[in-house]
Structures are given as C-alpha cells and as structure tokens.
Image (tube, rainbow, N blue to C red):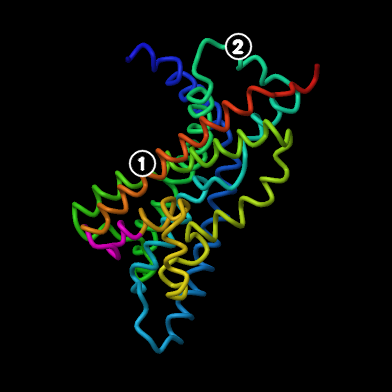
C-alpha cells in the first residue's frame, strides 16, 4: 500500500514545492486579504450596531470567522489550475493518459498541492497579525482568538483537513470539465461567484434569511468555510459539529465518485488538441 501511494505523494511534494516559489504573489495576496479583512469587519460591525434583533452569531464569533476566511481564502476552488489548462489546450495531457498510474488519483494529487500551497504561504503571516499583532496594538475586539475548548480545536483540525479534500474534489470537477470545454475561461468566470457566496466567505451563512437555510444546508460548498469556521469559533455545538464533519465526508465520497464517472466518460471520447 505504501509503495502504491509513493508516486502520488511525490507528485504532491513536487507540485507543492514548485508553488511555494511564488513568494511575491503570496506577499501581495497577504496584503490584499489583510485589507479586505478590516473592510469586512467594519461593515459587519456597522451591521451589528444597527441590528435590533439578536443575531445568530456573536460579534466575537464573526471576528474569528472573518480572519479564518482571510487566512484560508486561497483554499477556495474559485479557479482552475492554469498549468493543467495549458496541458489540455496544447495536447500535453495525452502524456498523462499513458502513465501507469490511476489518472484520477494523479490529477487529484496535483490539484491538492495546487490548493494547499498558496494557502500555506499566506496562513502564517495572517495568523501572526490577526492573533498576535492586533491585541498588541490595542485591537483585542478585532483579534483572532483561540477555540473555546480543546474539543472544538480538534474538531476544527479534522474539519479543516476535510475542507482541503473537499476543495480538491470540486477543483477536480473543474479540471475534468475541460475535457469537453478545452478552455478554463468559462469555469473561471462562473466559479468565483458560486464559491464565495455558497461557502459563506462573503457573508456567513447563518446571517442569511431563515428560508434560505435549508438550501444552504443541501450543498457542498458550506463544508469549505461555514462548517470549519463555525466549529472553530464555538458557534456550533460539538454534537452538531460531529454531524457536520460526517456530512463533509459524505460530500467528498460523492464528489470523488462523480469525478471518476465523468473522467471515465471524458477520456473515452477525448480529442487531443495539437495533433
């Protein structure tokens, strides 16, 4: 089993280390996300100040939610891998069809590194500023705090790991769609709006009207942001958190099965571009 996984682990390692080279982009992304973190907190603070009803999330939970979102923004499946898109357009994807490896797992390994590496570059400085620097500057109310309990922290780690896998599963569907569309331009324009809204990145999902909550509950994107962040902040009870983690697992299994089915269909009638 260990030897069978070695080629895929090597793909994750090589792709991850290559993506870690883009430090200038990570620094620019960190500055942008820090700026938008403050903007979002200002807007939500004004919203909470004007509200006359008890909100479903406290302001302290909102602060944790916002900073976690800015920390892990690059994890969201809002775009396709440009390198993979080039392979499809040029016809180089045909070489991967000849490798003596499981094609879905091979592409999954590459997509996993594509999602994890940019996030990890921005994660440490964002947590350092939001959790360490802001309290030192006197902004305790707007600082990221530790989870309310050890169990919340452990469940968050599990849920966050599943969120990475879930993001990779959705990215795989985007990549597989290019076997028919050839170009990633269409999916790159549609995916950001769907992902950031349905995941809760723009507005935390509990703040939406009650009639929308069942619709939000029946879609996989909430497992990317809403579930792990609410577990971390303590907004979600531990019993419900365990159920939500199981829901993440079910979505991962379903999306993997769907991805494998579509990949099998796509490779049967694949037209290789470039010759």
Quadrant for the C terminus in the image: top right
User: What kind of element bears circle 1?
Assistant: helix
Q: Could you tell me residue 64's position as x and y percent?
A: 37, 62
Instruction: Tell me, yes or no, whether the highlighted magenta stretch contains residue 235.
Output: yes
Residue that label 2 marks = 98
Residue lying at 64% horizontally and 29% vertically, measured from the top left: 84
Q: CA distance from mark 1 to mark 2?
A: 31 Å
- Viewer-nearest residue: 44 or 23: 44
Callout 1 crowding tier (Cα within 10 Å): few <14, some 14–19, many ≥20: few
Does dot 2 land on a helix, a strand or a loop? loop
Residue occupying the point 55% across, 54% down = 195
235 or 264, which is in the foreground? 264
- Of marks 1 and 2, the one in the foreground: 2
Is 95 part of what is drawn in magenta? Answer: no
Q: Which residue is mark 1?
A: 161
User: Which residues are drawn in magenta?
Assistant: 230-238
Q: Is residue 264 above or below residue 156?
A: above
Residue 57, quarter of picture: bottom left
**Residue nearer the viewer, 258 or 223:** 258
Residue drawn at x 52%, y 40% as measured from the top left: 118
Disc nearer the start of the sequence (1/2):
2
Residue 45 percent coordinates (x, y): 45, 77
- Please tell me how crowded label 2 is: few (under 14), some (14-19), or many (20+) other residues with Cα within 10 Å: few
The percent coordinates of residue 230 (x first, y second) are 34, 60
Which residue lies most toward the bottom here?
Answer: 52
Q: For this view, does 266 lie left or right of residue 227?
A: right
The residue sitting at the left extreme is 150
The quarter of the rendered structure image containing the N terminus is top left
> Where is 26 relative to 60, above or below?
above
């Amino acid at each position: 089993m260990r030897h069978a996984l070695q080629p895929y682990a090597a793909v994750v390692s090589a792709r991850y280390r290559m993506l870690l080279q883009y430090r200038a982009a990570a620094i620019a992304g960190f500055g942008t996300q820090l700026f938008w973190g403050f903007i979002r907190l200002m807007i939500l603070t004004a919203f909470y100040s004007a509200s006359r009803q008890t909100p479903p999330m406290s302001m302290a939970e909102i602060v944790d939610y916002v900073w976690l979102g800015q920390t892990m923004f690059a994890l969201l499946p809002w775009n396709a891998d440009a390198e993979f898109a080039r392979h499809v357009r040029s016809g180089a994807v045909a070489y991967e069809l000849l490798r003596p490896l499981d094609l879905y797992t091979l592409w999954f390994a590459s997509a996993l590194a594509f999602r994890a590496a940019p996030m990890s570059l921005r994660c440490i400085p964002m947590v350092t500023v939001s959790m360490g620097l802001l309290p030192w500057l006197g902004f305790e109310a707007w600082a990221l705090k530790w989870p309310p309990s050890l169990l919340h922290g452990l469940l968050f780690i599990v849920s966050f790991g599943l969120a990475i896998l879930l993001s990779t599963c959705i990215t795989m569907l985007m990549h597989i769609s290019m076997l028919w569309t050839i170009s990633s331009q269409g999916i790159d324009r549609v995916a950001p709006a769907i992902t950031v809204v349905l995941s809760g990145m723009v507005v935390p999902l509990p703040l939406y009207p009650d009639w929308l909550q069942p619709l939000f509950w029946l879609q996989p994107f909430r497992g990317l942001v809403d579930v792990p962040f609410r577990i971390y902040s303590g907004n979600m009870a531990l019993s419900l958190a365990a159920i939500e983690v199981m829901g993440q697992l079910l979505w991962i299994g379903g999306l993997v099965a769907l991805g494998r089915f579509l990949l099998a269909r796509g490779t049967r009638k694949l037209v290789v571009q470039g010759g």
